[in-house]
Amino acid sequence: MSKTNFEDNMQNLEQIVTELEKGDLNLEESIIKFEKGIKLSKECNKMLEEAEKKITILLEKDGNLEENNFVAED
């Protein structure tokens, strides 16, 4: 499975929300879409958390910004 980026995940999530809001899906289809939406939401949240950690690694030391490498935990 190829890794998708944040923007692709958000676009897919928006599409799922639109389909669910229309109300044209039966219950089973709605549940499947909802589950996929929850999964995408969690993936996006994880990506945002990792980006936030990368940003907070930029430390100010003696008036200079210092960038340290960040390793994501799985």
Image (tube, rainbow, N blue to C red):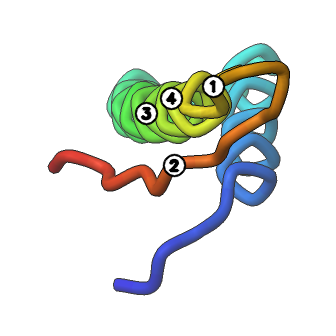
Kind of residue indicated by mark 4: Lys
Mark linked to residue 53: 4
Question: Mark 2 or mark 1, which has the lower sequence index?
Answer: 1
Choose between 70 and 36: the one closer to the eye.
70
Kind of residue indicated by mark 1: Leu
Q: Which residue ends up furthest to the left in the rendered image?
A: 74
Q: Which residue is mark 3?
A: 46
Identify which residue is drawn at 57% across, 39% down. 54
Is residue 2 visible in this depiction of the protein? yes
x and y percentages locating residue 57 in the rendered image: 54, 32
**In contact (CB < 8 Å): disc 2 and disc 1:** yes
Nearer to us: label 4 or label 2: 2
Nearer to us: label 3 or label 2: 2
Mark linked to residue 68: 2
Q: Quadrant of residue 35?
A: top left
Q: Could you give the CA–CA distance between mark 3 and mark 4, rounded to whole angstroms?
A: 11 Å
Identify which residue is drawn at 63% across, 25% down. 59
Choose between 54 and 2: the one closer to the eye.
54
* Secondary element type, mark 4: helix
Relative vertical location of residue 10 with respect to residue 18 in this rendering, above or below: below
Kind of residue indicated by mark 2: Asn
User: Neighbour class for label 3 at 10 Å: few (<14), some, many (≥20)?
Assistant: few
x and y percentages locating residue 23 in the rendered image: 71, 17
x and y percentages locating residue 63 in the rendered image: 83, 20
Q: Which residue is mark 1?
A: 59
Nearer to us: label 3 or label 1: 1
Kind of residue indicated by mark 3: Lys
Question: Mark 3 or mark 1, which has the lower sequence index?
Answer: 3
